[in-house]
Each structure stands twice: as structure tokens, then as C-alpha cells.
Amino acid sequence: MKKKVLMLSAAASMHDQFNRENIKLLISMGCEVHIACNFLQGNNTSEKRVESFKEEMELKGVICHHIDFERNPYNLRKNREAYIELKNLMNKVKFDLIHSHTPVVSIYARKIAYKMSIPVIYTAHGFHFFKGAPLFYWLAFYPMEKFYSKKTDVLITINNEDYNRAKRKFNAKKIIKIPSVGLKHEYYDESLKNTMTIRNEFGISETAIVLISVGEINKNKNHRIILQAISRIKNYDLHYIICGKGSETEFLKELANQLHIDNRVHFAGYREDISDLLHASDIFCFPSKREGLGMAALEAMQSGLPLITSNVHGINDYMEDGITGYKCSPKDVESFTEAIEKLASNKILREKMGQYNKSAVSKFYCENTDLIMKDIYKQQLGISEKEIENAVI
């Protein structure tokens, strides 16, 4: 009888972007894998991408369940409905293990699984409370995470700050840190398109300095500070490509217009050719106010770009100021302005930092994470390597 594992997240895009390696690993271990998420709302990719992901999973034998999960913890009516849907699913299918992602969904999972004596793994993709976080986040999320840690068999963190705090303050049976959530070896090493093909798409000249950001366009990602910094710099032909979609898009377009840089700020939307865009750029900007780790920045490192980032949370796990790029306070426009000017004015420095980053990022490859995750799954499912070999055969 195959072991049944339920993978949970609020939105399908979370599974698509950050949980593929876990799903692949469980399949290779002979498990029956189920994923539950909201396939219709809350995704930061495209409808086409979500549908493609679902079809791909089903072709691999993964059983998909749509549940109306909400990312907003204060939508009480929708959250109650999602809780009931999840409870019905867990009563219907006798799961051997739950692996949950995203805070709100993980509360539901642990609450139900604890009563049903099902072991739970919870991967925290960056706690909302961290050094320098707003008091509201500490009040809203810290007590909740601390309380439910008691109902957690394995708490997985992805950065040093979260890991150290969890070890000191939380009560999960096991607390483990993994180096990343799916950075593939050599995936962003090369570009399939010519640099000028990409630049021509946006009307950018060969000699311009191109900054790029990748990720959901929301307040937390803090793109606005890069716009403000660019507007202060007059000596260089700077262009800024923003890849992604989200609630801040229209605001940023209006801000670019007000700052008179709208002809140099390019909203690319959701893209599936990120490697090509990175290789057509010169500097990667990652000014987030909060970041569990930041796969987009690691991908930029792998592509050989220097980074300009904020100095908060999981970003500090890979950022070395003056070596991988420059770190700035997320509210300090002047600091971001100076960092952009330093890199824009010095091609040799950009290349030196980029080459260092290509080497330094290797410790975050998914191969390293997979070894840890396989051991966790084996222990929680109570299966041996021999049983895995027999199940696959």
C-alpha cells in the first residue's frame, strides 16, 4: 500500500514555484501524492501557467484538489469555508503525512491533523515577524506561530534568523533549516535569446544600463524605492524592467509617470523567459521589506548579476555587502541611489561581483535540500531505503 502524502499551500503558484522538488522527491519514493490549493485565486502567475501546472501534475499521477484557500487571514467567512473543505478531504482520504506551506493554511492543517494523529511538516517560507518588522506583524503572527508549533512534528525554516528564533522560542518536535526551496543547478546559467533581442523588445539600447526585478508586484517587494532612486540619477542611461504582476502595478506606473521616468521603466508582466531577461540586464534589484530567502535573487546570482538588495531577513543569508553587491535599508532612497551609481559607473566591478555570485550560489542548489528532505520524509513516513527501492520497482 502506497503512503499517501498531502501537500498544502494557499495558491497553486506556490506549489509550482517552490514545491516541485518535494513533489518529485515523494513520487520517486513511491508515495501517492495529493496537492490541495486554490487553483483559481491568489496566484501570482497566469491562469495559463496554473492550468499547465495542474495538467503536468495529473500526468505524473498527482491527485489535485481545489480548496478555496485565502491568503488573507482576516477573511473569516472564506477561511471557515476552506477549513471545512480541508477537514472533509482529510476525513475522506486517510493521509500518512501532511506537508504544509503558507501560514494560514498551515494553521488549518495542524489543527485538523493534530486531532487525527497525522504527522505534519510545516515549511515556513519566511516568518512575518523578524528583526525590524512592524509591531503589527509581531502581534498578529508571532503568538499564532508559537502556539501551533506545539502541533508541528517538523518545522522547516529557510533562513538563519527564522531558524535561530524558532530553536529558541518554539516547541516543534524537530526544527530544521534547509538551504533553499528549489534552485536548480545551471538552470539560469545561459540565455536562449540574444541580449539585443530582449532589449529591442523594450526599446532599450545596447549601451544602456539595465536594472531588473522579478517577483510579485506588491508593497512588500518595495519596487517604488528603485523608481525614486532612478529618478535622482541623471548621469547614466538607466532602464528598469519589472517582471511580475500584482496589486501595485498601476500605482508604480503612475509613480513612474510622476517622476518623469515612465519611458525608462518597463512592466514586463508575468514571463517564462526569466533567464533571457536576466542575461540581457546588468544589475538585479531586490529591495523587499520582508523576504524569507528570495529565490529570484538567487536566480540572478546564478545568471551572473550583481545585486542591490535590502538588508533584512533571509536576504542576509547570501548578501555580502561590497562583495555580492550592495545592501541598503529598505526605506533609504539615498543608499539605493548610491548603490546604483556605483555599479552603473563600473562595468569591471559588475562583472567581478557577478562572477563571484555564480560560484557563491552553489550552496543553495536543490540537490543539497533534497538530501535533507528525503531524510525528513523517510523518518516521518516510517519507511526505509529498501522499502523505497521496492516501491519504485
Image (spheres, rainbow, N blue to C red):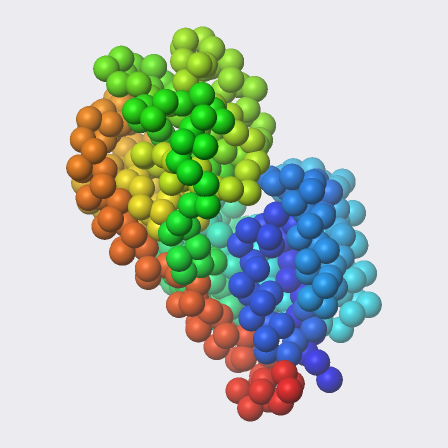
- Number of numbered discs on residues: 0
Does 211 sit left or right of 150 as displayed? left
Q: Which residue is at 26% across, 37% downward?
A: 327
Q: Is residue 345 visible?
A: yes
**Residue 214, placed above or below residue 115:** above
In the displayed structure, does residue 297 sit left or right of residue 154?
left
Residue 378's x, y, as percent? 54, 79
At horizontal 53% and vertical 54% (from top left) the residue drawn is: 18
User: Can you give x and y, in whole percent of width and height, for residue 179 in the image?
Assistant: 38, 61
- Residue 298 at what x, y percent from top left? 38, 49
When the figure is inspected, residue 320 is found, relative to residue 387, above or below; the finding is: above
Q: Please state which of residues 103 and 353 is positioned toward the viewer in this rendering.
A: 353
Identified at 55% across, 91% down, the residue is: 386
Q: Quadrant of residue 168?
A: bottom left
Report whether residue 107 is seen.
no
The C terminus sits in image quarter: bottom right
